[in-house]
Image (cartoon, rainbow, N blue to C red):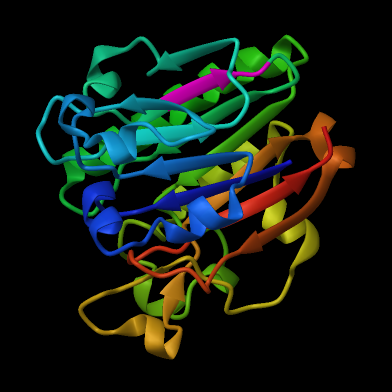
Amino acid sequence: MQILSWNVNGIRAIARKNGLDWFHQEKPDILCIQETKVHESDLPNEIKYIDGYHSYFSSAIKKGYSGVAIYTKKKPKSVQRGFGIDRFDSEGRVLIADFDDFVLLNIYYPNGKASASRLEYKMDFYDTFLNYVDEFAAEGRKIIICGDVNTAHKEIDLAHPRQNSIYSGFLPVERNWIDNFLSHGYLDTLRVFHQEPELYSWWDYKTRARERNIGWRIDYFFISENLRKNLKEAYIRTDIFGSDHCPVGITLEI
């Protein structure tokens, strides 16, 4: 089973640039998308309905903001939009798909750079997410979590760690939260296979950073420990363009 995750920075813009052609050609089992920037009611049919896939969307109340989507060949048993908390669910950041064999959480985590209040919101979101996913873990469920986490975990995960250590996205409090999250029994799938540096998933548009690979790894796949034996590979698809992020993916035997 191949699952991919991509922050597209606007799904309609990506589609206009033929940025989803690879998806139609490769046909992964599941594609999770973040930052759709469109309400489901405004989606064109060619994006909303893709042959061979069931599609699900969660949209922000605010127009042109946030939003996540899941395209899956296998129909989930159920799909939930959000944590059931208005403060977070109003931004359309969460889709939770239960496939019986595993539960998949596709999440666009908040960015904390705008202000102290947004950093507080981000950290509250992180804690709410961890409490929520730990409930699945307590039930013995197999868990897959993917999305734009908006934090680089280790110094190896961004090109200029020292210069960015005072900014949201690489603050000690954010990095420590990832340490705590992983200590609850979750794996950073890419680092199971790849320990080398300069593996990034986001590059600043304005400075044309992708051309020089001056980037950050802020897009992740995490799995619960009870899926370790099923994990066969984890990777970053730097060959796919169209957004300031590139897709990340995993291969599982389930």
Looking at the image, is 120 positioned above or below residue 204? above
Secondary structure mostly seen in the magenta stretch? strand
> Is residue 55 positioned above or below 1 on the image?
above
Is residue 96 highlighted in magenta?
Answer: yes
Q: Position of residue 143 (x, y in %)?
A: 68, 27
Residue 230 locus on image (x, y percent): 85, 39
| Drawn side of residue 99 relative to residue 140, left or right | left
Quadrant of image for the C terminus? top right
Find residue 108 and report its image quarter.
Answer: top left
| Magenta-colored stretch includes residue 191 | no
Relative vertical location of residue 121 with respect to residue 177 in this rendering, above or below: above
Residue occupying image coordinates x 9% and y 34%: 63
* Farthest-out residue, bottom: 212
Would residue 151 appear left or right of 12 to someone viewing this image? right
User: Where residue 208 sits: x, y (%)?
Assistant: 29, 84
Q: Position of residue 233 (x, y in %)?
A: 77, 55
- At x 74%, y 70%, the residue is 195
Residue plotted at (53% across, 29% down): 105
Residue shown at 59% from the left, 28% from the top: 104
Residue furthest front as drawn: 51
First to last magenta residue range: 95-99
Q: Nearer the viewer, residue 147 or 117?
A: 147
In the image: residue 69, left or right of residue 92: right
